[in-house]
Image (cartoon, rainbow, N blue to C red):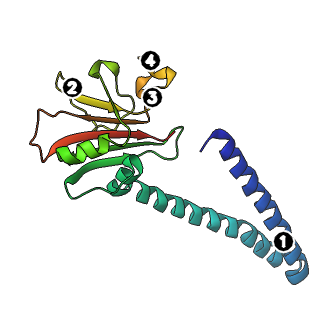
Amino acid sequence: MEGLGWVIVLLVFLAVFLVWTLIVLAWAAVAIGLSTFGLMRFFSIWIGVPVLAIVVLICVVSAISFYQSLPRVVFRDSVGFDPTKDITFLNSLRHMPTDWDDSYLEFYASDRAINRIIHTGFTPISPADIIEYCNTPKWWTPPVGPGVRIYATNTKDPEFRDKNFRYFVSHRLLIYDPEHGDPGKRKVFLRYRRP
């Protein structure tokens, strides 16, 4: 979520909390009076309900984040179709919400599945086109060497011409070594950055 989005969410939360305060205050004044016992009850309701709502909200966001990090979901969001039987997941990670929404996958796939993924808008690039892989999970270690194949999307973006920005500009990056593994099981590394 962009910076302005967080500000809007915060303002909406504050407005709802203010309305809640007025409702509880009116109820306290009419129903229970503002005696010492009534005042304690008022404050426990006034603070307790919003705190409970925040805890529920945190639980819901955590559950959604967990679901969005499942390998099958990350794969579907990254390439646009459900994984086939010839794809075996090893690792997945989805950073969210952050400044950018990155997903990382490591999986085994057949040559047929790799070609199907490549045909979703990838363009081959040279391994020399990517200087480094920044802020990746420890297990996301793509192969290096002369036989490695790297494919990227949105290579026509003007910023893609700058070698320092290629990794950041590319929305999707697919890396594998066709020389290792058999045609039915090659290790593939996929990174997807939502635009």
Q: Is residue 115 visible?
A: yes
Residue 161 image label: 4
Residue 45 coordinates in the image, percent (x, y): 73, 72
Q: Is residue 134 left or right of residue 158?
A: left
Marks 2/3: CA distance? Answer: 19 Å
Question: Which three-letter amino acid code belongs to the residue tagged 1?
Answer: Ile
> How far is the residue under mark 4 from the one under mark 3?
12 Å
Q: Nearer the viewer, residue 32 or 182?
A: 182
Spatial CA distance of label 1 from label 2 is 63 Å
Q: Secondary structure at mark 1?
A: helix
Q: Which mark is residue 144?
A: 2
Residue occupied by mark 1:
23
Front: mark 3 or 1: 3
Mark earlier in primary sequence (2, 4): 2
Residue found farthest to the front: 119
Residue pointed to by mark 3? 168
Residue type beneath disc 2: Val
The answer to the question of whether label 3 and label 1 lie on touching residues, with beta carbons closer than 8 A, is no
